[in-house]
Each structure stands twice: as structure tokens, then as C-alpha cells.
Amino acid sequence: MGQDQGNRDDSNPGPLDKTVQITPCAGRVLGTVTDDTGHPLGAQVRLGEGETTETNPNNGTYAFYMAAPGDYIVRVTAAGYQDAQQQVTVAKGQHVQVNFALQPDPMEPPGGGEDPPPGGEG
């Protein structure tokens, strides 16, 4: 019954004996898109030349959760509004807030801007 406990090799600890520290590499870009009066808008938001997302039309919020560190242009488009963009720099693990207040597009009013059919019923 004699295993020798005195010959244990502690130079190679098992997998549970190590402490691992996780450092976030990606950052987040998030914000709100509203009209010029502060009402939330449904809009398309693009981060750089890559990822695209839609805002939540109830509150105008959007988020990119896995943005690699670097410089980006955030572009926003919404029907009936002028496009907008802002340049941002994302650092490792950083959250960057980028809000937009879009101006109405005089060439394309919100709601499609279609004229009623001529002549009415008849």
C-alpha cells in the first residue's frame, strides 16, 4: 500500500493549477440615431468598409460589439434624411459612443415623398 508521496513532481502543474488573465482585444462602437428633434430613427449603420447593422427603431440605438482596434468612419443612412458620418478611433477594450442627429433630406422627405396620383377618383 505504499505509494511514495514524497516523489511528486511540482515542476509541471496540471491545467487547473494555472491562473489565466483574459484581456479584451476588441472594442465596442455604440450610439443612438435620432432626427434633428431627438426622435429615434430606424437607420442603417456601417462601421468602416465592413460590418453593417440596423438601429433599434424604438429607441434608435445600435452597437458593434467586436470592433478591432483602429480608425473607422461610422456612416449612417435613413430614408428621408441626409447621410451622416463620423470618424472614430477604437482602442483595445474601449467603448466608443457615436451619436447622430440626422437632418431631413429636402430631396427625399421622410415617408417616401411620393406625390398623390393625379386626378383622384373618378
Image (cartoon, rainbow, N blue to C red):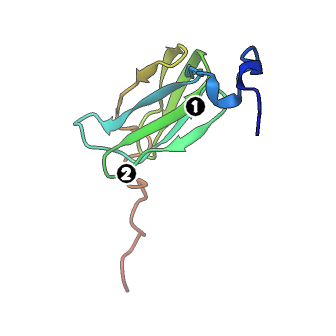
The residue at which mark 2 appears reads as 57
Against 76, residue 113 (above or below) is below
The residue at which mark 1 appears reads as 66
Residue type for callout 2:
Pro
Q: Residues within 10 Å of mark 2 (few under 14, many from 20)?
A: some
User: In the rendered image, which quarter is residue 68 located in?
Assistant: top right
Q: Residues within 10 Å of mark 1 (few under 14, many from 20)?
A: some
- Near-viewer residue (52 or 82): 52
Q: Residue at x 43, y 39 (%)?
A: 62
Instruction: Specify the farthest residue to the left.
Output: 37
- Near-viewer residue (43 or 93): 93
Against 88, residue 100 (above or below) is below
Q: Residue at x 47, y 27 (%)?
A: 29
Q: Position of residue 87 (x, y in %)?
A: 50, 16
Q: Residue at x 60, y 16 (%)?
A: 69
Name the image quarter holding the C terminus.
Answer: bottom left
First in sequence: mark 1 or mark 2? Answer: 2
User: In the rendered image, which quarter is residue 6 located in?
Assistant: top right
Against 68, residue 77 (above or below) is below
Q: Is residue 88 left or right of residue 14?
A: left
Residue type for callout 1:
Met
